[in-house]
Structures are given as C-alpha cells and as structure tokens.
Image (cartoon, grey):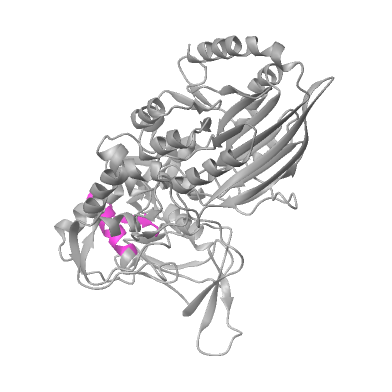
Amino acid sequence: MRLTTLVLVVLAWLTPSLGAEEAVSTQRLTLLHTSDLHGAVLPVDDVTNRPARGSLAQVATLVAAVRSEVDQPVLVLDSGDAIQGTPFELFAHVRWGEPSPTIGAMNRVGYAAMAVGNHEFNFGLEVLRRGERQATFPMLSATVIDRATGEPAFPPFVVLEAGAVRVGVLGLTTPAIPGWEMPEHYRGLDFLTPETALARWLPVLRTRCDLVVVLAHTGFERDVETGEPAAGADPFEDSAWRLAHTPGVDLLLTGHTHRSIPPRRLGEAIVAQPGSRARFVTRVDLELERGPEGWRIARFEGANLPTADLPADAGVTAPLADLHARLTRALDTPVGSVSAPLSVAGCRVADCAALDLIHAAQLEASGAEASLAATLSPRTPDLPAGPVTWRWVHGLYVYPNSLVAVRLTGAQVRDLLEHAARYHDGLDCSGEGVGCTLLTDPAIPLYDVDSMAGVSYRVDPTRPEGERVRDLTREGLPLADDEVLTVVVNNYRAAGGGGYPHLAEAEVIWRDPCQMTEVLGEFLTRHDPYPAVADGNWRLAPDVVTERPTGTPPSVD
C-alpha cells in the first residue's frame, strides 16, 4: 500500500508539469550529498568533550551558502547510517525517547531524501520507524523487503522536480544486515542484493524520470582507480563497482565504508563517497541538455568539500542546546572508579587492562568460561586513576552491541584466535636498537582484532597464517580440540561479523538485551574501585616494542 500510494502521488504530481518543460533545452542542477553521519549533529565530540572535525550544524552552513550562490535547484541527499554513532543520539532518541537530534537537524538542513543504512537497525524497528515518522523527507530502501507482502518495507524511490528535470532517487541498503544484527531488530524483513533491487526499479525510474540518482549504502568492492579487488572488501556487503557499471544509472552516491571519494566517472555513472561524520559534503554540479532522446548530462564538476572550518548554523545548535546540556550532565556522572590508569594504546600488541575490563564485564554478565572481544576505537581517551564517567565508558565501547554466549569446541576456539592473529603479520628485526617491530595487515580493521580471556596463549607473528597461535591452554592444561566451553561475544561477532568462523552456526545458550555500555557501567559500579590490571593471559613472542602497519589501515569511525 505504501508503494502504490507513492507511485500514484508521483504520477499525479508530474503530469501537470510536462507541457511547461517543452521549451527548456538546458538545465543546471546541484547535488549535495552526505553519508554515515553517525549522529554527528553538533561540532563537539561527546567522548572527548572537544571540538569535532565535522557536524550537521556545519553542513547546514555549507548548504545555505551553496543555495545562496547558485541560481539553480539544489538537492540535498544522504546515503544512510544517520541515527547511530554518538552518545547524543543514543541518549536522546533511544534512552530518553526524545525526537532524533540527527533527523531534526536533517529536517532543518532541508534534505530531500536518504537511504536506509545498516546502522539504522541497531536499536530495533520501533526506533527506526519513529525516526522515519519524524523525518520530513523519505527514508528509502528498495532492498529491505516486508516478508509478509514481498514488497519494499520502505519507499524504494522518490521522484523530485528540479526545474524542468524529473530526478528519480532510488535507495539501496547493503544486504549484510542479518549477519550483524540481532534477529529481533529486523523481524519480518528480508534483504535483497542491491543488484536485484536495481534491476527491478531502474526500468521504472527510466520511464518516468530524466535523471536517475542511486543512494547506495554500500562501498566499492574494487579500487575505483585500478579496478583491482579492494583490500578487505566483501563483494556481498559491498557492490558499488557493479552498480556503477549498470546502464541507466546516472549518479551513484555511496556510503558505508567511510571513504572520501571525490566525484568521478566510473562505468557509465558519476560516482562519489563523502567520508563519514559530516566531515565532507560531496558537491556535484550538473549541466543537462535536452536532445531528441531526452535529457542527458552534458558536463559535470564536483568535489568533496570539508566542513571542519565552517561555523555552526545557529538554527541547528540553538534548539538542541538544552538537550545537549542534559547529555553533558549525564555523561559526566561517575559510574565507579579505577585504581590505576587505563589506556587502549598497545592493546593489540599485548594484553591490556582496558580490554580486560571488557572481558571481565562480559564474563560476569554471561557466566561464560571465555570471552572474545576487541578494543573498538583508537579514539578512546586515556583514563587516569580515579572516577570513571559514562563519557569514558561510551568512549571505550562505541557500538550499541549486546552480548551472546555460545558453545564451542577447543578446535573452534583455536580457529577464532587464528583468525584474529592474521593481523600480526610478521616482524621486522632489521632496525637498530633492542627488539623488533611488529608488521600488521592493513586490510584488517582494528575493531576486528580480538583477544580472548579465560584461556592462555601466545601469538607468533613469524609463522604462517593458521599456525600463529601457540601454547593454547585453559586452567594450566592444553586446550583439547574436543573440549567444550562457553564463549561470550558481542552480537556482531555472534552473527559472524568480521569473518570470524563458527560463531554464526554455534549453539546459542544465552542472550542479553542490554547494550554493552550498560553492562560496563553496572560492572564498574559493582566493582568500585576496579583494580585495572591486565592478567597477561596472552602475549606476542618474540617480544615486540613498536607497532607499524604495512599499509594504510581502513577507517574505524
């Protein structure tokens, strides 16, 4: 019913305008595009309480400036992952039940449409639908399907009038969501591949529109410069290269992988990606000409414009001032204390107290025998001995994950640890001084480098992949391949996130509906003061004193 209503409204809206277009032979149009905003509404980092490098408040300033400088239609679009990523969005929209600060700011900016991203599902459908109702623009996805009807669960597209040109905007969402989310967060939904959804709806748009813009919450599975497979890309999760080579797509505006890709031609389409957290806005200026076969793009130019040095729009910041003041008080509330400093620096080179805090909270909450976890953000501030606030807890654990306990064999545990040890990619002992430098695999995101508590082991980076985990023991005895133990992981890992083997098929024996930030806060309150020492259950051997990537690691924001 939603789809039928949309199409009828669009057709009725378009019909009166056809005659007026006949005399127009050229049309200029500006597109402004963001993606992966992740709740970056105000120009302040809620974790560090310092100025941020981008925000929707600064995007609003940029959009207003562009609209004032051009005498042509301006469409503002977004490719998803908007309503998750900051304590501000979490506290206001999820915990306090307030309207989404992010959606409110996007309404103020005047967005014309956005695609639904995978992180839109992090808090469940009720929160997502509440944000959708708040939005004054459509939230689009042709890939998310209502299982009961077989039709899209969101509007698949919208048609926008831009002067004499009809612009069809199609939304696509990565289909990998069931591999990351708890089933209750997408209950009643199925997910098509973007190629399947594009094949269904592109002919519809091509018959009704002059220009087709695809908002795709998916990254490029191939390097846009060389065409070689992109390091770390999953062709199921990322499909933008294939979409760009689909005839009939005029513009492909992408997201998901947080890369800054300025506008360029790829295949038959103009493609771009604006990074993340409102640090850049993609601007594409089009000049269209009408010919015998309709409108075509005669020329274009574009760039990814930084927002960091722009002032914040008071129209965005002022209505949120009281709400943000409440957030500041909440984040600065202590939940406990630590008896020694905590830092995430070096947690991938050796066992560390910060990661052991996560392990300890996971083990106590679940009653499991072992815990698998990673430090999720290098932006986590160092914590001196003394009080621990909610602000630091949210800096330590930046994703809204929950916990799952599964049953695994010793052989499967070893496979998990070998998967994590792919990151430790050799030693360089050629330099002067004491010790060696660890070489690391840049294709592996830092949030996918896990360690395990409840067992002891060492990682030898000089050995081949699959043979790096040595001396694996539990309670002082070698861990037998057929020994069975319970392992607690976050829900992302439990669904196979990060490519970790066995977890998605493992027997689930316990689930926790609480988010990990709540689990950590309650753990610190019960164990006040927390001793904040590492138990040293794992190490690299031989000794390593520094860490150097063998290339440029992917973004973890």
* Residue 279 locus on image (x, y percent): 51, 52
**Is 250 colored magenta in this rendering?**
no
Q: Is residue 107 in view?
A: yes
* Residue 283 locus on image (x, y percent): 62, 43
Q: Residue at x 71, y 11 (%)?
A: 19
Q: Is residue 132 left or right of residue 285?
A: left
The residues colored magenta run 355-375
Q: Residue at x 33, y 66 (%)?
A: 477
Of residues 139 and 515, the one nearer the viewer is 139
Q: Is residue 295 left or right of residue 545?
A: right
Single out the residue that lies furthest toward the bottom: 433
* Residue 551 locus on image (x, y percent): 61, 66
Is 64 rendered above or below residue 336?
above
Of residues 54 and 547, the one nearer the viewer is 54
Is 139 rendered above or below residue 528?
above
Of residues 479 and 321, the one nearer the viewer is 321
Of residues 441 and 314, the one nearer the viewer is 314
Q: Residue at x 41, y 39 (%)?
A: 105
Q: How many marks?
A: 0
Q: Residue at x 32, y 56 (%)?
A: 370
* Residue 253 locus on image (x, y percent): 62, 39
Q: Is residue 537 left or right of residue 152?
A: left
Q: Is residue 501 in view?
A: no
**Is 365 colored magenta in this rendering?**
yes
Determine which quarter of the picture holds residue 364.
bottom left
